[in-house]
Image (spheres, rainbow, N blue to C red):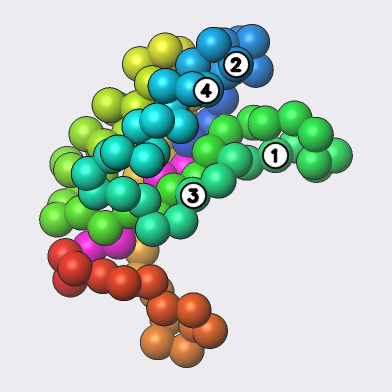
Amino acid sequence: MLFVLHCLDGVDGTGRRPALMAEHSARLRTASPKPLVYGPLLSDDGESGIGSLFIIDVPDRAAAEAWADADPFRTGGVWQEVRVHRFRQSANAPVQLPVENA
């Protein structure tokens, strides 16, 4: 099943992010499962990071929550809020994500 993780930084997220970036990036390269899509959420000016967005393929919501909770940005206090939503891609989308846990 696909899940979207919408992760919003806390008040001091910008200050904490640089110290944890290398560990966070290393996890994204080695995490199981690897996210299908991910990237930073930016402020309207496109300059400041305000969070992160992921699409992951896991068996259930508990696995999605555990995946997010294991990230250094979560354990290190960068993300204040993590919203988890089940996601179904449209058959009409121009790009189709590979799904194993359907």
Q: Point out the tag, 4 or 3, that comes first from the N-terminus.
A: 4
Mark number for residue 18? 2
Q: Residue 99: image x %, image y %?
A: 26, 70
Q: Earlier in the sequence, mark 3 or mark 2?
A: 2
Disc 4 versus disc 3: nearer the observer: 4
Rendered position, 6 above or below 72: below
Q: Quadrant of the N terminus?
A: bottom left
Residue type marked 2: Pro
- Crowdedness near tag 2: few (<14), some (14–19) or many (≥20) residues, C-alpha within 10 Å: few
Q: Amino acid at mark 3?
A: Tyr
Residue of label 4: 21
Specify the label residue 7 is tagged with. Answer: none
At label 4, the amino acid type is Met
Q: Earlier in the sequence, mark 1 or mark 4?
A: 4
Residue 11: give x, y in percent of width and height: 62, 14
The magenta segment: 1-6
Q: Is residue 87 above or below residue 32?
A: below
Q: x%, y% of residue 42?
A: 70, 39
Q: Which is nearer the N-term, disc 2 or disc 1? A: 2
Please tell me whether residue 25 is drawn above or below residue 95 in the rendered image.
Answer: above
Dot 1 falls on a residue whose secondary structure is: strand
Q: Which amino acid does the dot numbered 1 rest on?
A: Leu
Disc on res. 42: 1
Q: Is residue 91 visible?
A: yes
Viewer-nearest of discs 3 and 1: 3
- For disc 3, the marked residue is 38
Q: Are marks 4 and 2 in contact (CB under 8 Å)?
A: yes
CA gap between label 1 and label 4 equals 16 Å
On whether residue 3 falls in the magenta region, the answer is: yes
